[in-house]
Image: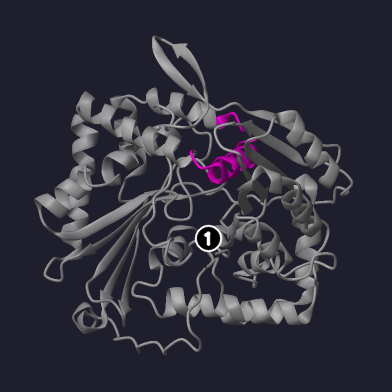
Amino acid sequence: MKRFAGLGGALALLAMFAAPVAAQGTQTESTQTEGTAAWRLPIETRKLDNGLTVVVSEDRSSPTVGVSVVYHVGMRLEPENRTGFAHLFEHLMFQGTPTAPKGVFDRVIQGGGGRLNGSTRPDYTNYIETAPVSALKPILWLEADRMKTLDFSQENLRNQQDVVKEEIRVNVQNQPYGLFFVFDMNRLAFSKWANAHDGYGSFEDLENASLADVEAFHRDYYGPNNAVVGIAGDISADEAFALVEEYFGDIPARPTPARPDVSEPLNTEGRREAQADALAQVPALAVGWKVPGRGSDDQAPMAVLAQLLAGGDASRLYQGLVKGREQLLNINGGMGWPLGHAWDYDGPTLLTLFALYKPDVEPDAVLGAIDEEIAKIVAEGVPAETLAAAKTKLLADYVDGLEPFISRADELAKAQLLWGDAETLNKVPQWVQAVTVADVQRVARTYLTDANRTVIDRVPAAMAPARGLEAPTPPAAPAVAPGQD
């Protein structure tokens, strides 16, 4: 269901994006570039007088549509001492308005055979739906209605504070490893509060959120001039623009606070921490490096390098450390993982690896093996066929991720919001195909250094004394039965 779209089960170990041919059934434009078919999404963009940007991709292959409304606010912009507030607010967006009370949104969309969701990420909050094209008008009406105002009530606030706290119990406090490879990694790797704090939130901060905080957040960040609407599917651009104008055009623009400077340089000294886990059965290691900023010439090479290192069973680290040395039980990771992907961030992010390793293996041995694989790439590069295979897999996953209309609408809206240009989606394949062996060597040498590396070693309680750690107290059982996120 809705809420943080996977900051629990799905957030644990998902990879999502990346492609040279369009997935079957997707209507795309095709042009010839240097003798090869170039994949393109049809994209049209328009900006309303109130600042709302609309991006449309027509596709008549199914009588359905996907809709995404993305706001340029996420965990990085939540107020200090209000950790988890952006996520809490996302929940409140589903609690109804004076015009459409709680439950109407879900009933209208799901009752017509549609699906809906929402998620909070570092740089944006998105609300997505897919349904038969006949449901597009009600969807847009509902989205415009909650852009105007919400049902700001103490009852709704208290209810959702409890829901978010229960998510934390279920997904962090009562789960092995407790998402340490996300929020603990950010805390250790980054220096600025905006990048480093726990976006899930502390109970104290969540409880201290007031109705005044909620009203101010909606006023400041949920105006049309801070949002993009993406629509993909069985509708023409002109029809979609007219409908968005009809439902959103009379919502006035609202002043939005200046975005803070969240930029950070690469780290100049390695950072490391050891933790004990009362629920874990085997030790785990999280390793992260700060990566190139959005729009950097190094972004695409780093995405390819991440694929080479950790992109599935064929990757260097899986073959070298899981299959070859047999040190690891598994390994997952990627650029921006697991809160996003290589193209959807607007501030500092990491290439993160998360691995379970065998109890008789020392963590330094794992780190040494990872360093060896990186050093081989720096010194020797990779064979041309290996690079080609990695790029093909990266791009195949990319297009596959754009196949569902709901995902396509969302990626269109996010690209427009974060890059200022939805056409970025059509440029990514070209950027990836242009990556050379030398590019991969350069980014490995520049970014994957010990000085820029952050490491967290998480061990079961039974192993804690041997590592000089205090054995943790097992968490209490959840107060109520876990719900779906």
Q: Residue 92: tell me if it is visible.
A: yes
Q: Nearer the viewer, residue 275 or 237?
A: 237
* Residue 224: percent from left, percent from top: 79, 47
The x and y percentages for residue 382 are: 21, 30
Query: Is residue 146 magenta-colored?
Result: no
Q: Is residue 380 left or right of residue 97?
A: left
Residue at image x 18%, y 59%? 328
Looking at the image, is 200 positioned above or below residue 474? above
Which class describes the residues within 10 Å of circle 1: few (<14), some (14-19), or many (20+)? many
The magenta span reads 403-424
What secondary structure do most residues of the magenta stretch adopt? helix
Any part of residue 421 in sight? no
Secondary structure beneath label 1: loop
Q: Quadrant of residue 231?
A: top right
Q: Residue at x 29, y 32 (%)?
A: 441
Check the image and report above or below for 393 versus 210.
Answer: above
Q: Is residue 118 above or below residue 373?
A: below
* Residue at which label 1 appears: 5
**Is 348 left or right of 152, judged from the image as shown?**
left
Q: Is residue 182 left or right of residue 164?
A: left
Using the image as rendered, state which of residue 246 and residue 458 is in the foreground: 246
Tally of numbered tags: 1
Residue that extends furthest to the top in the rendered view of this protein: 35
Query: Which residue shows up at 28% across the image and 63% down it?
Result: 285
Q: Residue at left 54%, top 69%?
A: 200
| 423 drawn magenta | yes
- Residue 263 in the image, given as x and y percentages of width and height: 56, 48
Q: Amino acid at mark 1?
A: Ala
Position of residue 464 relative to residue 48, above or below, is below
Q: Position of residue 343 (x, y in %)?
A: 50, 40
